Amino acid sequence: MLEIYWGSGSPFAWRVLLAAELKRVPYESKLLEFSKGDLKTPAFLALNPRGKVPVIRDGDVVLAESLAIIAYLERKYPEVPLLGRTPEETGRVWSAIAAFESYVRDQTLPLNRWLFGDKPRTTEIDDARAAVGREYDLLEARLAKHDWVAADTITAADIVWFPTLRTYQRAAARNEARAREVNLHPLADVYPNITRWIARIEALPGYDKTFPPHWRA
Ligand SMILES: N[C@@H](CCC(=O)N[C@@H](CS)C(=O)NCC(=O)O)C(=O)O
């Protein structure tokens, strides 16, 4: 059976779990603990020498990198397409994925560290918020007219954007003052359409199985 190695709260691993659930692919969950050094054991480094999740093992196939894993699952289990049903959709899906990877992903790291930490706010945080804000405004406008990011149904584009956006709701729950300070709380006031889209994803069958276990604590 397909094995998925993941870590609680990893946005990249969350993508893969969501893809497997949406495609209804049976899999064995291999939940690793970052704090216990599970990602740096010889056994795991043999699967991914970079010591990062997600990783899948499917028979003889071992694969790291969330987007590569989604592409693999798409070819192997095409029945529920996540990378577009037409050439145009495929283009739109990848365009939205590339936008996230190019303009949002790296800005998210300093912003999240600040939101969940206690370090003082710096211009780096303000710059990161401004940069992701430009992208969130575009997403908010898209979701004002459409239910999903790149097509009229959920695709990998939604899966790629979702974990980061959902993390802001958690940030507000953990440190409301900081989330408010950078205008990420209340998310439903700042980004009402994104908030409704988050709720749509959370209502999907199988979503609960992907929810970071340590967030429930
Ligand atoms: N580009 C990779 C990113 C994977 C990644 O950065 N994973 C993080 C968790 S969010 C990780 O495993 N970090 C552990 C470490 O670097 O020690 C992907 O898309 O899969």
Image: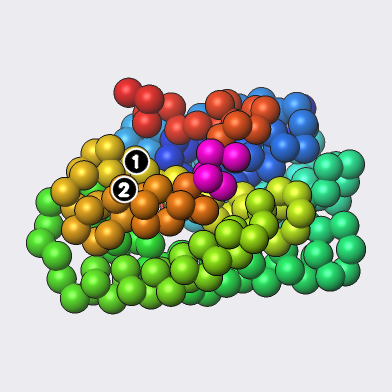
Quadrant occupied by the C terminus: top left
Residue 70 visible? The answer is no
Q: Which residues are magenta?
A: 196-200
Q: CA distance from mark 1 to mark 2?
A: 11 Å
Residue 8 in picture, x, y percent from top left: 44, 35
Tell me what residue is drawn at x 69 percent, y 42 percent: 19
Looking at the rendered image, the quarter that the N terminus falls into is: top right
Residue 112 x, y percent position in the rendering: 31, 55
Residue drawn at point x = 59 percent, y = 58 percent: 143
Look at the image and name its color scheme: rainbow
The reply to whether the magenta stretch includes residue 198 is yes
Mark 1, secondary structure of its residue: helix
Residue 186: which disc? 2
Question: Which residue is located at x 47 percent, y 38 percent?
Answer: 7
Percent x, y for residue 58? Answer: 76, 38
Q: Does 41 lie within the magenta span?
A: no
- Using a 10 Å C-alpha cutoff, classify the residue at mark 2 as few (fewer than 14 neighbours), some (14 to 19) or many (20 or more): some
Task: For ligand 1, tell me if the residue under mark 2 lies within 8 Å.
Answer: no
User: x, y percentage for residue 125?
Assistant: 24, 68
Dot label at residue 170:
1
